[in-house]
Image (cartoon, grey):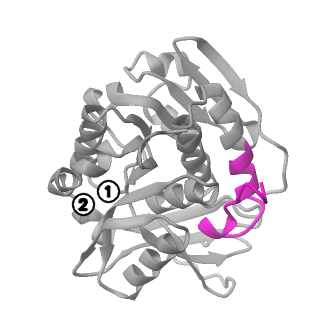
C-alpha cells in the first residue's frame, strides 16, 4: 500500500460522451438513423481516474472543465466516485465533448472536441506541484496539450512518482517523455504509429517498460526482465468505449500498490474485459465486488 496520500494522480481530459448506437455507419453524404442519444461522463483522463477509484484507489485529478452545464456534469461525476477535484480548474467556455457512434459489434468511432481540455497548461502543472509529491503513480494521456503532458511527466519524476503514459490519441512525442514512461501503454494502432508492434522494439525507443493492449487477445508487457503475454477473459462485447481507459486506470492503481508489471497487467485485463460487457465508458467500469 502506498504511504502517500494518493495512489494515483491523473493529469488529463474530462469530456461529456454523446453516444448513439447505429446498425451501420453512414458513408459520406449519407444519413442513417440511430438510437436515442445517451449522455455519459467521459474523457480519457476522467475515465482512468474513475476506473481506479471504483476499485478502491485514492485518486486526485488535474485538468480543466468548462463553465457550461457539461463541465458541471463531469465534475459532479468525478466527485461522485470519490476523486479529488481540487485541481480541476473551471475554465470559461465549453467543456470537452466526444461524439461517439457504436456499431452493432460494440466497436466505436469517436470525434473529440477538446473544449477546456485544450487550455491545460504548464502553469497548471506548476501550481499543482504538491499534488505530484502526494501521489505514487501519475497517469497521463494525450487529450490535453503535449506541453502540459511533458511538464506533468517531469513533475512526477522530480517528485519520485511513477509515470504511466498512455500514448492516445497517437501523436509524435519527444524522446524525453518516452524515457520517463514506466510503462508506456499503447494499443496495436498506437504501437504501429510509433513504427514497431514488437514490445522489445518499443523498449528500444526509451521507455523503462511497455504494455501493448490487444483487445480480446489480451496484452503483452515488456521490461528489463523480458516479455510476457497476458491473456484476457473471453466476454461478449457490448460496447468497447472506455475499455482501454479502464485497463490503464486499474493498471496504474495496481502499480501503486507494488505489483510487478505483469501482475498489474493481468488484473487490468480483467477490468478491461468487465468494462466491455456494459454500455458507456464510466458507467461500465466495475468495482471490486462486481469484477
Q: Is residue 52 above or below residue 160?
A: below
Q: Is residue 90 above or below residue 135?
A: below
The residue that disc 2 covers is: 120
The quadrant in which residue 254 appears is top right
> Is residue 289 inside the magenta stretch?
yes
**Element assignment for label 2:** loop
Residue shown at the point (47%, 64%) measured from the top left: 83
| Quadrant in which the N terminus appears | top right
Q: Are marks 2 and 1 in contact (CB under 8 Å)?
A: yes
The quadrant in which residue 4 appears is top left
Boundaries of the magenta span:
270-291
Residue shown at the point (68%, 49%) measured from the top left: 272
Residue shown at the point (43%, 21%) measured from the top left: 208
Task: Please state the horizontal and vertical placement of residue 212, each as a whole percent of the image.
Answer: 58, 32
Number of numbered discs visible in the structure rendering: 2
Task: Please state the horizontal and vertical placement of residue 140, each as a whole percent of the image.
Answer: 39, 46
Q: Residues within 10 Å of mark 2 (few under 14, many from 20)?
A: many
Can you name the residue that lies furthest to the left here?
Answer: 123
- Residue 144: numbered disc: 1
> Does 142 sit left or right of 41 as displayed?
left
> Does 220 sit left or right of 141 as displayed?
right
Q: Is residue 289 visible?
A: yes
Task: Please state the horizontal and vertical placement of residue 240, each as a whole percent of the image.
Answer: 67, 58
Q: Is residue 136 above or below residue 277?
A: above
The quadrant in which residue 116 appears is bottom left
Q: Is residue 71 above or below residue 147?
A: below
> Does 280 sit left or right of 205 as displayed?
right
> Is residue 23 inside the magenta stretch?
no
- Residue 245: numbered disc: none
> Does 54 sit left or right of 290 as displayed?
left
Can you name the residue that lies furthest to the front here?
Answer: 3
Amino acid at each position: 500500500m502506498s504511504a502517500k496520500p494518493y495512489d494515483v494522480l491523473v493529469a488529463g481530459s474530462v469530456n461529456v460522451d454523446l453516444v448513439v448506437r447505429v446498425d451501420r455507419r453512414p458513408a459520406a453524404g449519407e444519413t442513417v438513423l440511430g438510437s436515442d442519444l445517451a449522455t455519459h461522463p467521459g474523457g480519457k483522463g476522467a475515465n482512468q481516474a474513475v476506473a481506479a477509484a471504483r476499485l478502491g484507489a485514492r485518486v486526485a485529478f488535474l485538468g480543466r472543465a468548462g463553465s457550461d452545464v457539461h463541465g458541471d456534469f463531469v465534475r459532479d461525476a468525478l466527485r461522485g466516485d470519490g476523486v479529488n477535484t481540487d485541481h480541476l480548474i473551471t475554465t470559461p467556455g465549453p467543456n470537452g465533448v466526444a461524439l461517439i457512434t457504436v456499431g452493432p459489434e460494440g466497436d466505436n468511432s469517436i470525434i473529440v472536441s477538446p473544449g477546456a481540455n485544450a487550455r491545460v497548461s504548464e502553469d497548471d502543472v506548476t501550481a499543482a506541484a504538491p499534488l505530484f509529491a502526494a501521489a505514487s503513480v501519475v497517469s497521463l494521456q494525450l487529450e490535453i496539450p503535449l506541453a502540459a503532458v511533458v511538464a506533468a511527466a517531469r513533475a512526477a519524476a522530480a517528485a519520485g512518482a511513477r509515470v504511466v503514459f498512455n500514448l492516445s490519441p497517437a501523436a509524435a512525442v519527444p524522446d524525453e517523455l518516452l524515457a520517463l514512461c514506466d510503462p508506456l501503454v499503447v494499443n496495436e494502432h498506437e504501437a504501429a504509429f510509433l513504427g514497431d508492434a514488437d514490445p522489445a522494439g518499443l523498449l528500444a525507443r526509451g521507455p523503462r517498460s511497455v504494455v501493448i493492449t490487444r483487445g480480446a487477445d489480451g496484452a503483452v508487457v515488456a521490461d528489463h526482465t523480458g516479455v510476457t503475454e497476458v491473456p484476457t477473459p473471453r466476454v461478449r462485447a457490448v460496447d468497447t468505449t472506455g475499455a482501454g481507459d479502464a485497463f490503464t486506470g486499474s493498471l496504474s492503481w495496481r502499480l501503486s500498490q507494488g505489483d510487478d508489471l505483469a501482475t498489474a497487467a493481468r488484473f487490468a485485463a480483467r477490468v478491461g474485459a468487465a468494462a466491455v460487457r456494459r454500455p458507456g465508458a464510466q458507467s461500465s467500469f466495475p468495482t471490486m465486488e462486481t469484477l
